[in-house]
Image: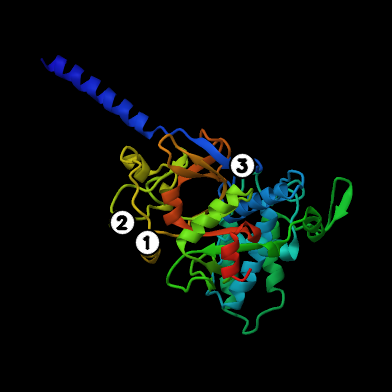
Amino acid sequence: MNKLLLTLLLVIGLHVTNAQEQQEEKKFTTVTEVKTTPVKNQQSTGTCWSFATTSFIETELLRMGAPEMDLSEMYIVREAYSKKAKRYFRLHGKGNFSEGGQAHDVVNVVKTHGFVPESIYSGNQYEGDFHIHREMVKSTKAMLDEIVKNPNKKITPVWFATVNGVLDTYMGKLPESFEYDGKMYTPQEFAKEMGFNPSDYVELTSYNHHPFYSKINLEIPDNWSGDLYYNVPISELMEVMNHAIENGYSVCWDGDVSEKGFSHRKGYAVLPAVKETDMSNSEIAKWEDGVANKTEKNKENTNEPKVTQELRQKTFDNFQTTDDHLMHLTGIVKDQNGTIYYKTKNSWADDSNKFGGYLNMSEAYVKLKTVAIMVHKDALPKCLKKKLNL
């Protein structure tokens, strides 16, 4: 009797497990996609902002007819660290000096310092080619903190050169000129010849604690430079993403990846079918199939909650939607149930999941968890460009 019961329980258990696995299996078909460059790996750094936006720029160059480029993400990061150090100093150590950043940080660097190919600047002067910045950032910040204490009662004029010396030791000196395909360039000349115009790009967000159709300073920690975003209703922000991708433009995406329904390893992100009051951030360490994802992996379904402007605001105000991660939207797909997803190029290596380093984020997930986007201004619908005076 006990053996028979045990056998039945095992059969039932296997059946349930198989059913759950089948329920989790999602099949995607492409609706439209934009030609892009290979997936990169940010490795052990908080520089997703540079990888996502550099991928976005490489894709823009392809759209404009330039050859496929492998641009140096770390050239941008190195220049940005110097800019952060200056601002941190000017704010007497009250600002943000960390690895994080925003899409506009890349565009701002390109505007003043251009860009270079990966073959020209690797940004790694330490062991191997594995990028890891924790020691460098912590030691540089400690140095800045001591400098702003002004122990000499007068700031020495070499402070900035000293900070840059530390950054150069870890990452390498920035090239003033270089040879590429038999021609000499400065980084600024190279960016100009490739046809990239930083002034053509805009950032948009959607939160109702600021007036719509105006430029706002979005209050997120990694907006350390205080850059401005166009604030629009969420319906129009979603329209921008759809209009862009459908017309051959990609989208640089900044948002929250700490929801239990986000799994890069499984290759998709959906909103958990729970009450909004039950949605809470998990630890950053749990983003990639951590404890939360493992314990909840069989509770996901397609019954996602309805996303409204008010829900977006509530999760933002409660720190349930946070500025976690930047990625690159390069297409639109559908699952077998007809649910719309955005094909998303991540920077966690091309062998990090079975989708070649991509994942698909559901329309509802993107609607709730998007903090901001960057697009070419011509990717905006005409009616919105008029409202924004662009």
Q: Quadrant of residue 14?
A: top left
Contact flag, marks 2 and 1 (Cβ < 8 Å): yes
Find the residue positioned furthest to the front: 383
Q: Which residue is mark 1?
A: 315
Q: Which residue is mark 3?
A: 39
Above or below 214: residue 330:
above
Q: CA distance from mark 1 to mark 3?
A: 31 Å
Q: Please, what is the three-letter code of the amino acid marked with disc 2? A: Glu
Q: Position of residue 262 (x, y in %)?
A: 42, 46
Q: Residue at left 68%, top 73%?
A: 159
Residue depth check, mark 2 versus mark 3: number of the one nearer the observer:
2
Find the residue positioned furthest to the left: 1
Picture disc at residue 342: none
Q: CA distance from mark 2 to mark 3?
A: 34 Å
Q: In the image, 316: left or right of 187?
A: left
Q: Position of residue 296 (x, y in %)?
A: 32, 42
Q: Nearer the viewer, residue 291 or 7?
A: 7
Question: Which secondary structure, mark 3?
Answer: loop
Q: CA distance from mark 2 to mark 1?
A: 8 Å
Residue 291 in sight here = yes
Above or below 232: residue 292:
above
Q: Residues within 10 Å of mark 1 (few under 14, many from 20)?
A: some
Q: Which residue is mark 2?
A: 276
Contact flag, marks 2 and 3 (Cβ < 8 Å): no
Image quadrant holding the N terminus, namely top left
Q: Residues within 10 Å of mark 2 (few under 14, many from 20)?
A: some
Question: Which secondary structure, mark 1?
Answer: helix
Image quadrant holding the C terminus, namely bottom right
